[in-house]
Structures are given as C-alpha cells and as structure tokens.
Amino acid sequence: MHAPATTHRRAALALFALTTLACGGALPAAAQTPVLNLYSARHYQTDEALYANFTKTTGIKINRLDGKEDELVERLRNEGTASPADILITVDAARLEVADSLGLFQPVQSKLLDERIPAHLRTPTWAAFSTRARVIVYNKAAIKPAQVQTYADLAAPAMKGQVCMRSGSHPYNLSLGAAIIAHEGEARTEAWARGLVANFARGPKGGDTDQIKAVAAGECGVTISNTYYLARMMRSTKPADQAAMNAVGMVWPNQISWGTHVNVSGAGVLKHAPNKANAVKFMEYLASDEAQAYFANGNNEWPVVKGNVAANPTLAAMGNFKADTLPIGELARTTVVAQKVFDRAGWK
C-alpha cells in the first residue's frame, strides 16, 4: 500500500526543517520569511503553544532542534562560527553557566529585559524566564512539619533512615549545594551533605517524582523536590497520584534565614547567531505577560516578571514564600565546587 499524501508531506516538511538548520538556518530568499533557529533542551509539550504564539505575534518562523543539554552544547562547540543557531534555551542555571563559560553566548542590550527581569535573575549574557523552588516533601504519618523546616534539618540525627534523594550529581541538587555553599560556606555544606548521606533510607535513584512517590508509600519519610513535580501530581486525575498527594505535605525551607532555593529556565543569544535581531525579539517575548503565563500554566513554573499573576490554582494553593535572591550567575559558578563537596561526602 502507498502511504497517504499527507504522510509524505509531513516527512518532506520534517526533512526540510532539518536541512534548513544544517544549511545555515536561512529560508530561500524568495520566501522572505524571517526565521529564528532555536536549540532547545526544554522538553515540555506545553512549550509548543509558546513557540506558535511567538510566530503568530511576530511572523518569525521558528526552526527548532531539541536535544539534551550536553549534546546541544557539544554541537554548538563543534559548529563554531558556522552554527545556524540563534538561541539556546534550557533548564538549570548551572547548565546555562556551562554554555556561557565556553563562550557560546553574546551580550544582549535590551531595555525591556532590564526593566522586566529582576537583576538577580539575569546576567549580561543570559536571562531566566521562569523559576522553580526546591522544597521539602514529607510523609504526614511519619514526620511532623516542625521537624523539617530547613534543608539542614534533613541532616539531623532525628532523620536517620528517613531520607530519599535523587543523585548528588544531578544539576538540581548541585544548584542547591551551590546555594548552601554561597550562604554557609564549603565546610558547613560538606558537613550537611555527610549528614544527609548518613540519613539515607536507600541509595539515590530515580527523579524527583520517584522520591515523592517513595515518601508517600512510606519507603522513606522525607525528600527534596522541585515544585513543578509536586504541582503535576496535584493536578493529576490519576487515583494513585491523588492518593500520594493525600499522604504527603510540603514545607518551604529556610523561611527564617536566606529563603527557599530556586532554580530557573533560561536562554541566551548565541555568539554566532545569524538572526540576532530575531533572537533578541524572542528573548523579549519570553519576558512578555503572555509568555510568562505559558510558563506558569503550562509547566507549573513561577513567572520571573514582577507583578505577573498566573491563573494557576495549583501554584496559588502552595501559598507565598520567601525565595532566595542569590544572584543566579553566582549560583551557577559554584556548582563545580558543590560536585566536589558531594563527592567527598559520598553522595553519588
């Protein structure tokens, strides 16, 4: 049987998109369609609406290449000055800093970005567009919230055999470690990490959602998770997820000291961007009220723009909290030290 014409058409369009990127990101001159070549390590289906609306609003067509952070960074290094990419967008400040330290970004001059994005959530070469907090999740039947009000509490002797965590080499935990180092010093952070490891109920495995489920099932009493994983389960209609949410509680850590650690999604204009003007427009679009709402409602992340109110009842149900305002660039640069600290502590 012959494949339907629409199937051939889709295959041709997909091949055309890949060829466009490989050949430098430019459409034929006759088409005169402005383009933006985007390398993305954000793997959220809800971002599709974000990109589609940018094209609808500006007329700029997005050619997108999805991949893992390390793969995209290595690709950009190999492409060098011939790279067709205009923008790199990804999650986690440490990953953005790696790209920046390799000289992949260029400075962006934008009054709009300076006005809308708080200074601690941007650097001269990249900016955050959404945030996610790293919170404490506990089993209501096993742990009292008063016992786990700070990250330090998880390393206390009272938590022996109660802690579940994902790998210490994961960027989410490294960024938390970097924040603790910045506030409390390397020695105290290593002592904390050693205490945490001593309290493990089992070896680190799985992602944040797996840790939440383990706490709900009583496999351990407490963990640390990014808020959007919790929000996804809170919004889920699956009976198992609803039961898990009934079994656990959440604490905003460190509210009487430096605040709850937050990490980001962010982007930067690449050094050899062939469509720099369009790239700047995209960065500015990500800071618009419309795009900020997409981040909040689509992936349960907090907008970075002050005063931007997201109509997300799940985020609202989590309540207000004091967030750490450590400059995101400083946080990102300390993750290498955090990895050494965790290695010495045995947090694999």
Image: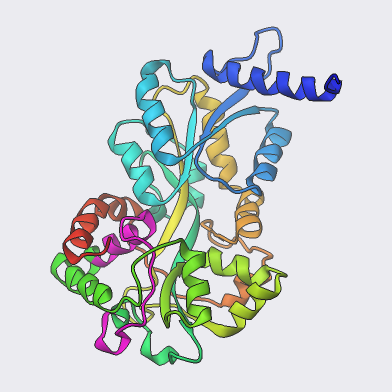
Q: Is residue 268 visible?
A: yes
Q: Residue at x 65, y 52 (%)?
A: 294
Could you tell me residue 327's position as x and y percent?
A: 33, 56
Count every numbered label the image shows and give the total.
Answer: 0
Q: Is residue 319 above or below residue 174?
A: below
Q: Is residue 108 visible?
A: no
Q: Closer to the camera, 302 or 219?
A: 219
Which quadrant holds residue 335? Answer: bottom left
Which quadrant holds residue 302? Answer: bottom right
Q: Residue at x 42, y 80 (%)?
A: 220
Query: For the view shown, which residue lies furthest in the left direction?
Result: 187
- Look at the image and give the residue range highlighted in magenta: 155-180
Which quadrant holds residue 20? Answer: top right
Query: Can residue 166 be found in the magenta stretch?
Result: yes
Q: Is residue 258 above or below residue 49?
A: below
Could you tell me residue 81's position as x and y percent?
A: 38, 17
Could you tell me residue 143's position as x and y percent?
A: 43, 90
Q: Residue at x 31, y 31 (%)?
A: 103
Q: Is residue 195 left or right of residue 76?
A: left
Query: For the view shown, which residue lies furthest in the front direction?
Result: 1
Q: Is residue 277 above or below residue 342?
A: above
Query: Can residue 171 be found in the magenta stretch?
Result: yes
Q: Is residue 187 left or right of residue 311?
A: left
Q: Is residue 209 above or below residue 59?
A: below
